[in-house]
Amino acid sequence: MPKRIFITATNTDIGKTYTTLQLLDTYTKMGYRVGVYKPIETGVNGLPADGSLLLKHAVALNPALKSLKLSDVVSLALPLPAAPYIANKAARIDLKIFDKALEKIEKFCDIVIIEGAGGLMVPLDDELMMHDLATHFKATALLVTHCRLGCINDTLLSLEMLKQLKIPYLWTFNCRQNDESFKQTSLPYFKDNFESLYFIGHNTPAVAQALLDKINSNNKESICDI
């Protein structure tokens, strides 16, 4: 079964798509056949912008994906740029449509990167939250966090949720050029309280390998539990 990585973030516009693209490139260089999936994309007027970019990039890296349509990669495209619960008018979402799409994609790849929408607590319908997708897919999550003032609170809240939900995870910063104050206002805390810090872009290969190590470790634990 292909390895599944679920990309989530501390909020919207943090860098999930950028991170996904970086990982697609890195895993290809490592010799893996990559695939990509974005179950839900909101704010779609015409073609899904993120889904289109992801599919085009993935196909360039893995030509076997050429047979896929954009609708195979983005199962639910909604026009309103809002949480799926609102954009989809609170309609119940059948997770089977995601399972079928993912099964189709996984025929062509060793690793599939699944990009969520917004953060972990974004509501999908009246029962499901975004984190439920990571659990449903049995995926290892990669939390992307920002480097602006407030990142300590945002990061710790999301990490605490991942721990409580028992979702296997790794996390990484996505720092941008205008985050000049990060080294002074936030980085000291993270250095004092975490053994390893990852920065997407600067050390993406380390992030990619750490994710594989996490997945392999979880798989061994699952086998031992049987």
Image (cartoon, rainbow, N blue to C red):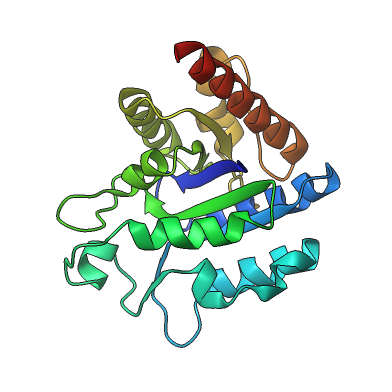
Q: Nearer the viewer, residue 67 or 201?
A: 67
Regarding residue 75, the answer to whether it shows in the image is yes
Estimate the x, y position of residue 49 in percent, counting from the top left: 54, 76
Question: Where 8 sits versus 188, above or below?
Answer: below
Q: Residue at x 76, y 45 (%)?
A: 27
Estimate the x, y position of residue 144 in percent, counting from the top left: 52, 42
How many numbered marks does the figure carry? Answer: 0
Estimate the x, y position of residue 89 in percent, counting from the top left: 17, 72
Using the rendered view, name the quadrant where residue 50 is placed.
bottom right
Q: Is residue 211 left or right of residue 120?
A: right
Q: Quadrant of the C terminus?
A: top left
Q: Residue at x 47, y 58 (%)?
A: 13
Q: Residue at x 37, y 63 (%)?
A: 97
Q: Quadrant of the N terminus?
A: top right
| Residue found at the very far front of the displayed protein | 226
Q: Is residue 96 left or right of residue 126?
A: right
Q: Residue at x 58, y 77 (%)?
A: 69
Q: Is residue 89 left or right of residue 10?
A: left
Question: Where 92 sits versus 34, above or below?
Answer: below
Regarding residue 15, the answer to whether it shows in the image is no
Estimate the x, y position of residue 198 in percent, counting from the top left: 65, 31
Using the rendered view, name the quadrant where residue 66 is placed.
bottom right
Q: Nearer the viewer, residue 62 or 208?
A: 62
